[in-house]
Amino acid sequence: MHDRWLRRVVGENLNLKDEDIAAYVKNIDQEGQELWSSLNKDADRTYLWQRIPSDTVSADYTTQFTKIKKLALAFGVEGTSLYENPELLKDIISAINFMVVDKKYNGSYSTGNWWDWQIGCTQPLVDILMIISDYSNDDTINLATKSIEGYAKRPSIQWPNYTATGANRTDIGLSVLGSAIIAKNDDRMNLVKDEVPDVMKLVTSGDGLYKDGSVIQHTKHAYTGSYGNELLKGVGKIKSIISGTDFDILDPRIENVYNTVLNGYIPLIHKGQMMSMVNGRSISRAPGTNPFTTEFAAGSETISNIMLLASGASDVYKNQFEAAVKYWLTESQGYYDFYANARDFDALLGAKEIMNDSSIKPSIYTGMKVYGSMDRVVQVNENYTAGLSMYSSRIYNYEFGNTENKHGWHTGSGVLYIYNDDLKQYGEGYWPTVDPYRLPGTTVDTKELADGAGYNKTSPQSWIGGTTNGTNGTAAMYYNSTNLGLGMDLKAQKSWFFLNGMIVNLGTNITGSTSASIETTVENRMMTSDENKISINGVNWDETKESKTLDNGSYVHFTGTGEGNDIGYYFIKGGNVDFAKDTRTGRYDDINEYFVNDINYTNTFFKMGINHGQNANNDSYEYVILPGSSEAELENFAKNNTIEVVRNDTDVQAIKDSVNGIFAMNVWTMDPVTVEGITVNDSASIYTETKDGIMTINVSDPKQKNVTLNVKLEKGYENVIQKDDTVTINEDGSFTIDTTKSAGATHTIVVNLEKTDKTALGIAIDLANQANLDNVIPAVVEEFNAALQEAKDVYNNVNATQKEVNNAFDRLAKAMHMLDFKQGDKTALKAFIDKVTGLDSSKYTESTWTAFDKKLTEANVIYNDVNAMQEEVNTAYSELVTAFLNLRLIPDKSLLGDLINQAEGLDSANYTKASFDGLTKALNEAKVVFENPNASQVEVDSAKATLEKAIAELQANSSTSSNVDNTVSTSVNNADSTSVKTGDKSLVGMFATITLLSVAGYTLLKRKENN
């Protein structure tokens, strides 16, 4: 176990030729050298390193131990310049003794934040002791271990005497485990084994994991990204260390953790970024000051933790975890260097292993989740991710603590996040510079607030939640600011309908008064490049600030950074809209006094909002957001909008898209209400899709009051195809839905709206049963039997839809038409294949043999194809015969060659120019024929005759005529040089009869086909 822990911290057999590993080691080396040089080594020192101004007294202890750990890493990691440096080791031991003795980190002393003493200090100290224990004397190790044992007594005790839950329990458990391994203390090992598994149970209130994938910490805060990550880390690390030992945790509740990763963590990570809406107060932390700061930093921690869990999970989970990790690492390249920022060697090497494994295919989660237990909603598709952050009577509005998240006032008030490939959008510097009073999606009173005002408040309203079919759905929030203690009275009923490629936003009953203004922020998007442009109704807008009156049907377009990152906004209902390009400067110490840096951030935001004034009375809004929409696509949508707002009032907010068969509504009233033919007896969230006569109904109780919902389709339905166990069908056809303990979850019903007519299908089945399959090609028989079986299955299925009936009928009818596809008679084809198979290719010209051989191959394929029909057989036979008739024997060129040699031996000086020119022409032509591999015997003989004639017609010069002999020397050849010479006696008569054979064979085939 000690070795496993050590491998995670300092690695093992590191490949320093790998540039990422080498860079990681180099960074450890540089940090170690810098810290060693700045370490206070004075004998009478009162500190090791100067306290950081933003650190509290207790935080300084955590910082000091964290810096000592960096020294220990430089000492323990092979490849650093300080590896196993004895002087550095001496200073590390001295530093530990100083902290334990002089600074009283002795297991009992504490001041300030308990977390620093029990977790912040113990975890780096355990790592330090693991690294140096083989080099140090027992006194130092024992002294420091006793200190850890004093602060981390057991996993279940939070300092000094509270019950530890969730992530705190796993963090403490890690410290207990580490100290137990160092001290070889079996009793403390068993404490980990016995007390840590409690965090893996599913809870229904308070801290912990929830069935729907929610993770809660600090009683009522959505905390998947920060504390939830710590819980994963604790479980993952502990499991990886004790696996296979006597202290292994074999609790079956580990499945809860795996399922929470699938349903809770993976959907909330966008291309490696853990969404801000589940990161709590950590969004206010400066990069590099804590593991949980930016979305990428939190995402990096999550990736590391999921890899840890994957190593011990079954293949069912492991494969999904690693596929997700590979997708995130791939998509974040160029924006975030995971390798350089890996928290330890375990994470670095694990990530590289996954990326280098070609068998692991990256996979993106797509779908929609309504986290009823933490008031969060997410919709993920291939083009964008939408996140919605709300609060209710069950969940706090935001967390402020330890001077962190001072301006988080409205982060739970219906903030709508739109993520795309512009991965800088919610990154470093976003939260210090964004206008905290105008977060996108919110309707709030913009009055100025004090730091941390109104934190940890639940709402007087319980109607917060939604429903989903797994891809699309709806969500809503009854916003009520009256109990925040901030002198506000604003109320608003807000709905979001998440459809394919768009989000429909409705607001109603916006009522309140203020000395500032009540505003609905449609958008507040960081402009991350010069590519960002804004247009209104197709006209470029380049002002700094302007208020415009938009007509119904107006549209605004934002050109994003990078292709596909545009966003369109369509105003179903127009009105006065404020536009601004707001350049803002801020620092992290504006929003956090604990984890800060000294950087001034300046960002420009595109802001667009609806100002309801100082005294709003039942105001409303209606608009659509279209992520990824180009300006042309947005204009087209505006001209052909299919979204209709059915109702937007205090009782019901409802929309429909008749073209796509969508109807959805959020019912606020507790009285029965009927909209678009659907009646419901109480408050509910309903989303329906109808396609091909099938309606899928998704219903939830967002108030989570354990009510019994009754839903009725006023126009009726033919039959119920599917329903959840929580749904009962009543005598009048209505549905009773038991929402007890469902925590806002969706209940699903699928009905067939149309009466199914199976008459034609039944007749077709009767006809098919009488079909004669003799001589029908096998492929057709196979399809016919499959179509007939499907038809019978559909006919006997009482829940079959008309579309299924029609499809089964069409398939069977098509298969029955194919019964005319008979097997071809191949007798003549086989006979001819047998005759020509075995011909000697060396005797024929290359081009004619190639053509013939191709057709012979094709004929054999047809012959061996049991599904070949008569027409295919006839064609193969005819083409093979034609290719055979076109065969040409390689001609005898020997006489032509001799004659060419003779002609080339003649001296032009002995002949008249005119006669020799004639010879030269005939000679060149003869050479072309001689060198042509495809020349026929006729062409060879003709060239020979022409050359002979030219030689015979040579005229000698008068001065040499008596000495010149131009007689042609030829060999005697009585054979016909143009006849075919195959050398195959079996084919002597073939050419004489081939035409008759072709005609006779084709006639035979046609006669058999006609029969």
Image (cartoon, grey):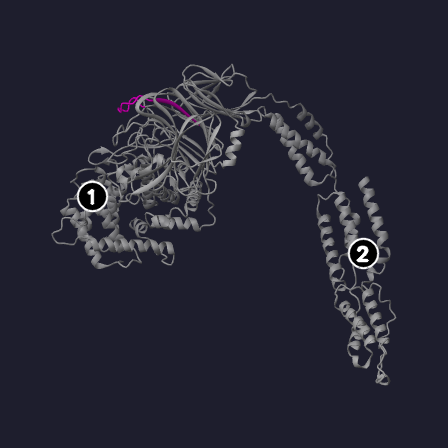
Q: Residue 417 sits in which quadrant?
A: top left
Q: Is residue 256 above or below residue 489?
A: below
Reply yes or no: does residue 926 show up in magenta: no
Q: Horizontal and vertical percent for residue 855? A: 74, 53
Q: Horizontal and vertical percent for residue 758? A: 64, 24
Bounds of the magenta segment: 481-496
- Residue of label 2: 885
Determine the CA span between mark 2 and mark 1: 100 Å
Seen at 78% across and 46% down, the residue is: 874
Image position of 37 (left or right of 920): left
Q: Horizontal and vertical percent for residue 258? A: 39, 38
Image position of 441 (left or right of 404): right
Q: Is residue 813 above or below residue 40?
A: above
**Helix, strand or loop for the magenta stretch, by majority:** loop
Q: Name which residue type carries label 1.
A: Pro
Circle 2 SS class:
helix
Circle 1 SS class:
loop
- Residue of label 1: 53
